[in-house]
Image (tube, rainbow, N blue to C red):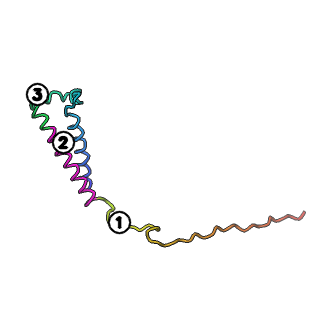
Amino acid sequence: MYTFLVLAEIIIAFLLIIVILMQNSKGGGLSAGMGGGNIGTVFGVRRASDFLSQATTYLAAAFIIIALAVNLFFLPGKGKTQESVIQSGQTQSVPAPQIPAQTQPQQSNP
């Protein structure tokens, strides 16, 4: 279920990007350069802007709802709680470093 919801989030994100870029801005937007300038002839100018605004609203709402659902219910590792050393309040003592014993080199008798 988690994987399905994450894939749905990715698909909705791409659709949201496309719908936002298709909307006309003051300079004509990206829709004129990508062939989206003809969308006004299909729906009519007023209906095209209404359709794109509603699509943006619905996609954004779906994106937020799925993101909240994933974070509240399906986030992996949510049940695993481990206390850190700082949170437990226990002090750990570090043993003093031990210096290796020095051995005298053996001298050979001639």
Q: What is the span of residues highlighted in magenta in the rendered image?
A: 52-74
Q: Amino acid at mark 1?
A: Lys
> What residue does disc 2 label?
56
Q: Amino acid at mark 3?
A: Thr
From mark 1 to mark 3, how far is it between C-alphas?
A: 55 Å
Sequence-first disc among 2 and 3:
3
Where on the picture, by quarter, is residue 47? top left
Element under label 1? loop
Check whether the beta carbons of the residues at disc 2 and disc 3 lie within 8 A of each other: no
From mark 1 to mark 2, how far is it between C-alphas?
A: 37 Å
Q: What's the residue at 12%, 29% (across, down)?
A: 40
Q: What's the residue at 14%, 42% (across, down)?
A: 54
From mark 2 to mark 3, how far is it between C-alphas?
A: 20 Å
Q: Is residue 27 above or below residue 8?
A: above
> What residue does disc 3 label?
41
Image position, residue 43 (x, y; %)? 9, 32
Prevailing secondary structure of the magenta residues:
helix
Q: What's the residue at 29%, 59% (across, down)?
A: 75
- Quadrant of the image containing the C terminus: bottom right
Image position, residue 70 (x, y; %)? 26, 56
